Image (tube, helix red, strand yellow):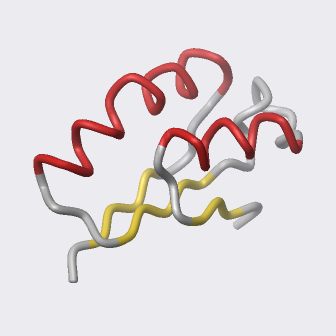
């Protein structure tokens, strides 16, 4: 199995990078599972349900919260 863990996606720039690049990375590396640390995805202030949905739609299989 091939896993990718993206640590600490921070704010809009981090979310945009995930949305733009994750689909290609999944395909190129034949990834089976992608886990994203989303605890700072709302500009360093946690995460919202809408942001979590964006990350999952971009191709994440799971989003972690906290350390």
| Looking at the image, residue 61 lies above or below residue 39 | below
The picture places residue 35, in percent across and down from the top left corner, at: 49, 63
Residue at 39% x, 23% y is 20
- The N terminus lies in quadrant: bottom left
Viewer-nearest residue: 5 or 21: 21
Instruction: Give the side of residue 32 with respect to residue 43, left or right.
Output: left
| Looking at the image, residue 1 lies above or below residue 18 | below
The picture places residue 31, in percent across and down from the top left corner, at: 24, 64
Number of disc labels: 0
Instruction: Give the side of residue 9 with respect to residue 47, left or right.
Output: left
The picture places residue 47, in percent across and down from the top left corner, at: 83, 42
Residue furthest bottom in the image: 1
Residue at 26% x, 51% y is 26
Instruction: Give the side of residue 16 with respect to residue 23, left or right.
Output: right
Residue at 67% x, 64% y is 64
Instruction: Give the side of residue 37 with respect to residue 47, left or right.
Output: left
Viewer-nearest residue: 26 or 39: 26
Residue at 23% x, 43% y is 25
| Looking at the image, residue 16 lies above or below residue 56 | above
When asked about the image quadrant of residue 40, the answer is top right
Residue furthest left in the image: 28
- The C terminus lies in quadrant: bottom right
The picture places residue 42, in percent across and down from the top left corner, at: 79, 29
């Amino acid at each position: 199995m091939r896993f990718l863990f993206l640590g600490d996606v921070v704010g809009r720039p981090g979310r945009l990078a995930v949305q733009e690049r994750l689909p290609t990375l999944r395909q190129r590396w034949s990834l089976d599972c992608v886990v994203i640390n989303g605890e700072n995805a709302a500009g360093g202030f946690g995460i919202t349900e809408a942001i979590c949905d964006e990350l999952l739609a971009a191709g994440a299989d799971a989003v972690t919260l906290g350390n």
